[in-house]
Image: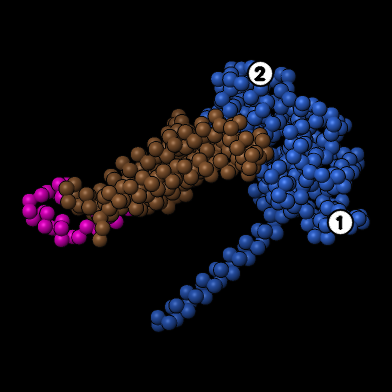
Chain colours: A brown, B blue
Amino acid sequence: MSSFVELLTENYGALASGFWVTCRLVVGSFILSAIVGTLVAALRIAPSKWLQRLGGIYVETFRNVPLLVLLVISYAGLRRSGVEIDTWTAGIGALGLYTGAYFAEVLRSGVFSVSRGQIEASLSLGFDYPQTLRRIVLPQALRTVISPVGSITIAMIKNSAIVGAALAVNDILKEARILNSQTFETEAAFFWAVVGYLLLTVAATIAIRVLEQRYAIRR
Amino acid sequence: MQGTTWRWLAIVALALGVLVAAGCGGDDDEGGGSAATTPAQTQEFAAGTTMAKLQEAGEITIGVKFEVPPFGFKNVKTGAVEGFDIDVANAIAADLGAKPKFIEALSDNRIPFLKDGTADLILSTMTINAERDEEIDFSEPYFIARGRILVKKSDNSIKGIEDLAGKKVCTALGSTYEETLKKQAPKAKTTLVDGYSECLEAIQNGSVDAVSTDDVILAGMIIQDDSLKLVEGEELTTEPYGAGIKEGDTAFKAFVDESTQKFKADGRWAKSYEKWVGQYTGVEQDPPTMTLEEAIDLSK
């Protein structure tokens, strides 16, 4: 056990920098996925067939392509076609757009949990469609999707390790692997990597739990 | 009517399943040893030694590179692994009287592979150095590579390692160049990837300015893409390659040394060198005479 502590104290800087890189990746991707997810979900429940189809195409594209393939396309692929994209933009972009597809599906299911009758009632009371969405449907939809959004966020935190591996971004996992290659302390290096990811996922879990207790609809 | 449709579907599905299974099976066979030469005379080994165990099992698992021409790479047509390291591996396996089974060993997992028994032997362009020697045992050097830098032909700004300051340089995670770059070019921005094919991709798509590793690996990249060139001048390092053996297995090390010594002495080394390196680089080289101690001292 002492070798575990030693590895941490001697290489604290490297592990901490990996932790911050992962944090930035995760926060950036979360914001992007929340924005994209909301927009796409709005398309999918729009009153026009074509807008719905557009949203559907987005979801099916980004949900059905493996994240690693998306990353290769968004970095190496774009660079080869002359776009000077950097690893951060490509990494956050790919992870955010990928997670956004799941986000959209979850939000859509939340919207469908609000009964058709409420929407009709709202429309007949004189609210227009955007108002109905904003004031009647979304407040209820958001409160039902807190738990699945939590699952997506945790999956996204773990998926950030794929970004690090694919794009040579020095995230938690990459720093642990560098330590492993230099010290050969395989168990200790990966132990601290797991601790790093746990810190993030447990924080996300607690945040979701608090939100749930405060806002979730109890049925 | 409905019943017959379903029956037909079931038959088609079954047929597909059988085809797929057959296809996979065929693949497996090809993926194994490229030239499993059964030796004419099989040596007898003392019971309990690694050699006796491997001979008994009839198979030796050897960790090699799968994407580093010309030392270890998958031939896309046949699916077999080929290269200089593979020739050495086949020679050792033949002396052992066992079929070689090749698995991919990356720079950062090859030492764990030996420690946990995933691989019996490692032949993956591995440089002998003092730090690694504390973790595993090495054979005597079977090849000597030199550390060099690869850049685009159009790039005239990098003429030596001192010019790497502020530039992005790619090398493999867990390779000796991680340290070399840190020491000799502390201001360079190092990109660490899993395998050298990723470095080739990175310099091609412009996300790094240079690749630093063994000259023979870099030569392999130039064979694949002639818009790249080596930076002339003094080599950065001398990199003696050794076969990796589990720490403390002295009998097996002696056997591997004897086998590679034969490989060097009877002309097979020279033939293999010419086939994989010489004909492309035009550089002539003799089998290394450097000893393991010299190789370890070199890294200190």
With A141 as the anchor, is B282 left or right in this view? right
Q: Magenta segment, which residues?
A: A106-132
Residue B218: percent from left, percent from top: 68, 31
Looking at the picture, tell me which residue is in the foreground, B212 or A165: A165
Q: Return the residue nearer the eye: B119 or A176.
A: A176
Residue beneath disc 2: B160
Of mark 2 and mark 1, the one earlier in the sequence is 1
Q: Residues within 10 Å of mark 2 (few under 14, many from 20)?
A: some
Judge from the rendering whether residue A79 lies leftward or rightward of residue B131; answer left or right.
Answer: left
Q: Residue at x 75, y 52 (%)?
A: B61
Image quarter (top left, top right, bottom left or bottom right) of the C terminus of chain B? top right
Amino acid on which the number 2 mark rests in the picture: Gly
Left or right: where B31 falls relative to A198: right
Spot occupied by residue B278 in the image (x, y as percentages of width and height): 78, 33
As drawn, is A51 to the left or to the right of B295? left
Give the label, 2 or 1, closer to the camera: 1
Q: Position of residue B5 (x, y in %)?
A: 43, 78
**Marks 2 and 1 close (CB-CB < 8 Å):** no
* Prevailing secondary structure of the magenta residues: helix
Name the residue beneath numbered marker 1: B48
* Residue A125, magenta (yes or no): yes
Mark 1 residue type: Gly
